[in-house]
Structure formats: C-alpha cells, structure tokens
Image (cartoon, rainbow, N blue to C red):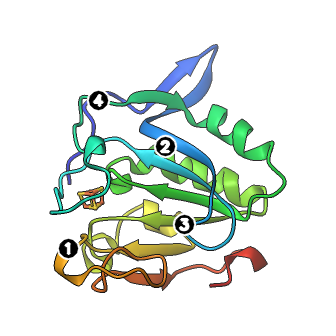
C-alpha cells in the first residue's frame, strides 16, 4: 500500500502531534453515514474510479496537513454530532493519524464510519480497521450507481465492524 513520504508524526515540546493530510471537512453532514456527522475528506487517492464525485482529492501533492488534535477540538464543540466519517481520497493510506484520531473520537462517545476504495478483504489485516465502527468498502462503479444506504454504487458494502456506542446502530 502507498503511504505518504512525509512522516505523519511531529513532536513539539516533547509532545507527539499527529498530522493528517486532508482536502477539507464538513462540520455537519447527513449523507456520509447515519445521523449528523463530522466528515473528514483525506487527500490522495490511487483508485481513480470513473465518475468519482471528489476527483480533486486524487492528487497526493494537493491538500494540506492538519493536527488531528485540532480536528478533535472542532468535533468536541458540537453536541449534535452522532459520529465522524473518514472519507476520500483514501483514508487507508493514512492509517496512523486516523487510528489515533478514531480512538479519541470513541472516547467522546461518538462512532466512526470510514469510506474506502479498497475491499474489506484487501484491508482486513490493517491497523486502521481495528478502530472503525462501520466500513463502506470498494471502489465506486458508475454502472452500478445507487442512491440507497449511504453507498455510491451497489457493489459497495456497509459493514458493521465494532458497535462501540448506541450511536453506532445502522
Ligand atoms: S475511492 Fe472514492 S475518492 Fe477514490 S476515486 Fe474512488 S470514489 Fe473517488
């Protein structure tokens, strides 16, 4: 799997700071999973699905780095949130900062959904998958486009991995 060449971890005054490369965020999304969700769009995607709705997230050189603790502070401010969604770009190319962030999101009592262009079988042994409650897997296939069940195309599966809070219910 491709990873970013720059380290996702910085240290400042002895404190570890996780850096995540993102395209942007949506503070309250109702289309990226169940309930009201803070959506984080990672930068960089190798899948290049035909008809992708976010092609501006493909280029690994674009986007910007954020501290995951700064994202967490924003998430913490909103009492209406049911959870947080990691989306693409491809989240599974930034496993370390997202695993750390997911742990901290769970400590707030929120669940974590993640969209990936990989299939579950391709990433089932990865580090990040251990920190995800609901996975939406597989590439977007334009010919199989659907508007049901928080998926873009019918080949994608909404897979409940770890029901960690009541808000995880699908
Ligand atoms: S995996 Fe997602 S972001 Fe990447 S090309 Fe496919 S639809 Fe677009």
Provide the secondary structure element on which disc 4 rests: loop
Evaluate if marks 3 and 1 touch, with contact meaning CB atoms under 8 Å apart: no
Give whichever of 96, 83 is nearer the camera. Answer: 83
Q: Say which residue appears at 67% left-offset and 62% top-offset.
A: 83
| Residue for badge 2 | 97
Provide the secondary structure element on which disc 1 rests: helix
User: Where's residue 73, x and y in %?
Assistant: 73, 37
In space, the residues marked 2 and 4 are separated at their CA atoms by 18 Å
User: Where's residue 68, x and y in %?
Assistant: 58, 37
Which mark sits nearer the N-terminus, 3 or 1? 3
Q: In the image, is residue 145 above or below residue 117? A: below
The quadrant where ligand 1 appears is bottom left
| Residue for badge 1 | 142
Evaluate if marks 1 and 2 touch, with contact meaning CB atoms under 8 Å apart: no
Quarter assignment of residue 74: top right
Provide the secondary structure element on which disc 3 rests: loop
Q: Say which residue appears at 46% left-offset and 74% top-offset.
A: 135
| Residue for badge 3 | 31
Residue behind label 2 places its C-beta within 8 angstroms of ligand 1: no
Give whichever of 124, 22 is nearer the camera. Answer: 22
In space, the residues marked 3 and 1 are separated at their CA atoms by 18 Å
Provide the secondary structure element on which disc 2 rests: helix
Q: Is residue 82 left or right of residue 50?
A: right
Using a 10 Å C-alpha cutoff, classify the residue at mark 1 as few (fewer than 14 neighbours), some (14 to 19) or many (20 or more).
some
């Amino acid at each position: 799997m491709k990873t970013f060449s720059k380290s996702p971890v910085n240290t400042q005054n002895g404190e570890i700071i996780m850096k995540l490369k993102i395209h942007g965020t949506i503070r309250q999304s109702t289309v990226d999973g169940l309930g009201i969700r803070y959506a984080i769009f990672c930068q960089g995607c190798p899948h290049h699905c035909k008809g992708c709705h976010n092609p501006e997230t493909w280029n690994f050189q674009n986007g910007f780095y954020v501290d995951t603790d700064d994202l967490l502070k924003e998430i913490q401010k909103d009492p209406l949130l049911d959870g947080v969604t990691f989306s693409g770009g491809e989240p599974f190319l930034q496993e370390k900062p997202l695993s750390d962030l997911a742990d901290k999101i769970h400590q707030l009592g929120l669940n974590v959904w993640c969209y990936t262009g990989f299939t579950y079988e391709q990433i089932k042994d990865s580090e990040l998958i251990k920190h995800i409650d609901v996975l939406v897997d597989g590439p977007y296939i334009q010919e199989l486009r659907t508007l049901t069940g928080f998926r873009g195309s019918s080949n994608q599966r909404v897979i409940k991995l770890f029901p960690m809070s009541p808000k995880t219910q699908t």
